Image: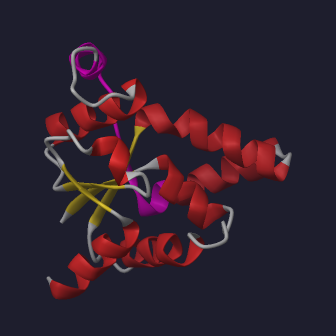
Amino acid sequence: MRALIDTCVIIDALQSRENFAKDAQDIFLAAANNSFLGYIPASAVTDIYYLMHRYTHSDKTSRDTLNKLFTLFDVLDTAGIDCRKAIPSPVADFEDAVMVETALRSEVDCIVTRNADDFTKSPVSVLSPKAFLEKLQTE
């Protein structure tokens, strides 16, 4: 299975966010165990760096975190065409629409996000972290 992991799930794991960390960290473990092919969109990498830098107050730690993250998840390039196609997208949030277009072009099986309600009009399957983990167990 090929899954695009949303920024919120990445940050939940990295910052051990209460109520969300367990499932997010289990996704990291599943990626480490090669239970699925995990991806993050290139358009999210700067956001992840920014949020980690605000959390750690350290450029080195934030960059080291990205390096470790890249051992678990490949980065899907966000192309200009993804941005163009996101403009008329039925997905209301533009950032989410760009991610959906990147996922479509890259032929991933699903997007894993804690904010599934933001993706109700996504043509790509969208799963919560818990639902994604359950699906991995049944496959």
The residue at 79%/51% (across/down) is 55
Residue 49 place in picture, x, y as percent: 65, 41
Q: Quadrant of the C terminus?
A: bottom left
Q: Residue furthest right?
A: 57
Q: Does residue 131 show up magenta in the picture?
A: no
Above or below, comparing residue 129 to residue 10 in the picture: below
Residue 36 place in picture, x, y as percent: 26, 70
136 left or right, relative to 12: left
The residue at 68%/37% (across/down) is 50
Q: Quadrant of the N terminus?
A: bottom left
Q: Residue furthest bottom?
A: 137
57 left or right, relative to 23: right
Residues in magenta? 70-86
Residue 105 place in picture, x, y as percent: 16, 34
Q: Nearer the viewer, residue 87 or 72?
A: 87
Colour treatment of the image: secondary structure
The residue at 47%/75% (across/down) is 23
Q: Is residue 77 visible?
A: no
38 left or right, relative to 103: right
Above or below, comparing residue 8 to residue 48 in the picture: below
Residue 66 place in picture, x, y as percent: 59, 50
